[in-house]
Amino acid sequence: MANPWNDPEAQPFIRIQGVSKSFGDYVAVNKIDLDIYQGELFSLLGGSGCGKTTLLRMLAGFETPTEGKIFIDGVDMSSIPPYERPVNMMFQSYALFPHMSVEQNVAFGLKQDGVPKKEIAERVAAILDMVQMGKFASRKPHQLSGGQRQRVALARALVKEPKVLLLDEPLGALDKKLREKTQFELVNIQERIGITFIVVTHDQEEAMTMSTRMAVMNQGMIEQVGSPVEVYEYPATRFVGEFIGSANMFEGTVVEEATDHAVVRCPELDADIFINHATNLPPGAPVVAMVRPEKMKAQVEKPESQYNYVRGVVTEIAYLGDMSIYHVRLATGMVVQISQTNLRHTAEQRLTWDDEVYLTWHPGNCVVLAQ
C-alpha cells in the first residue's frame, strides 16, 4: 500500500479541522486537526479520559463538536445525522441481539434499510464466509465464544458496506492469546475489503500491530501522528516515549552541538551521552535523552569508549520466557531497565542478582527530546 500521507497532492478521506468538545467546564477534545486517508487502518491510542472515544463518537455523529468541522469524503458532516453518515460503528460490547441467530443479527441492518431479501441473503452469506462464521449462521450469540461473537459483530458492521468503520476497543473483551490472533485477522479482513478502519484502543501492542498510522492522544490533544515505527523509534515528546513501550529517560543538558553529533551531560548517570546526529538545540538547552531497554547491552568488561556506558549492579530480574528484564542500580541511585532476548536454552550464562555490569548503547540508539 502506498503512503498517501507522504504525498502533498493526496486528498484525505477524513478531515478533522479544529475540533473541540466540551462537557460543561471539562474539555474532552481540544482543537484537534487530523487527516486520515482512504484504506487506512488508523488507531486513536491513549489512556482513559484522553478523548479518543469522544472523537470517535463525533465521527459517528453521536456527539456534536463544540467547535470545528469533520469532513468525510469531502462532505461536511455538521448537519448530517448518524443514520445518514457513510460510517458504521462496532462497539466494545458487540451489542448482539440474544434472541436472533448469527444470520439474523447480521441481516438486521439491511432489513431495516429495505434491501431485497435475495440481496440480503447473498450479502450476509458472503460476509459470514469472509469472517469464517458461515457454518455458525444458525447459532444464537450465547452459543458462541467471545472471539466468534466479535466476528459476528464485525460482519454486522461490514455488511452495510460503509465507507468508514469505527471500532471502539474491538478486542477488549478477548483473552490475550485470542486478542493477538484476532489482530492479524482484522488486518487481513481490512486489507481485503479496503474500507477505512478507525480503531480506538488503549492497548499499545494492539495499535502497533494493526495500524498503518496512529495518533497518540493525551488530555484531549494529539501528541504525535505517525506509523508504529516512527512513533516508537522517534517519539515527538516525552509523554509518547514513556507511553509507547518502556523507556529509560535521562535528564541533562546539551554541552556540545555539531552538524553530525551532539553530547548531552546527564547528572543522573554521572556521565556524558554521545549522539551521532545533531539535536538542533543550543548548548545549555535542557533535554531528555531516551534509550529503549532493548537497545542497551550488559557486559562485565569495562568498554573502551569514553561515552555511552554506565556501571551498576543487577537488583531485579523478570524472566518472561522469550525475554528477560533486568533492573540495574547505578552509583547515583538511578535504576536503569534493560531487556535481553533469551536466544538459547537455560545452559547459557545469564546475568544474576548482584552482578556488577556495564551498560552500553550505540550512539544512534538515543533519542533527544526537548524538555
Image (cartoon, rainbow, N blue to C red):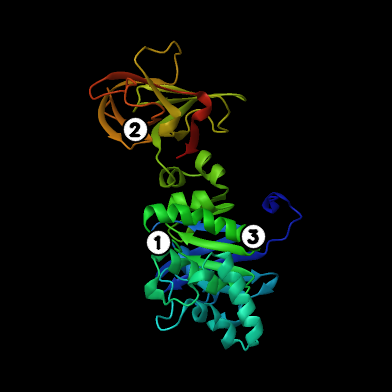
* Residue 356: percent from left, percent from top: 28, 18
C-alpha span from label 2 to label 3: 38 Å
The residue carrying pointer 1 sits among few (fewer than 14), some (14 to 19) or many (20 or more) residues within 10 Å by Cα, namely some
Instruction: Please name the residue shown 62% across and 63% down the image.
Output: 196
Instruction: Please name the residue shown 64% across and 60% down the image.
Output: 192
User: Helix, strand or loop at disc 1?
Assistant: loop
Amino acid on which disc 2 is placed: Ser
Among numbered discs 2 and 1, the one appearing first in the sequence:
1
Vertical arrangement, residue 121 with respect to residue 33, above or below = below
C-alpha span from label 2 to label 1: 27 Å
Among numbered discs 2 and 3, the one appearing first in the sequence:
3
Amino acid on which disc 3 is placed: Arg
Where residue 287 sits, quadrant-wise, is top left
The disc placed on residue 324 is: 2
Among numbered discs 3 and 1, the one appearing first in the sequence:
1
| Residue occupying the far front of the picture | 135
In contact (CB < 8 Å): disc 3 and disc 1? no
* Residue 124: percent from left, percent from top: 59, 76
Q: What is the count of numbered marks?
A: 3
The quarter of the image holding the C terminus is top left
Q: Is residue 160 visible?
A: no
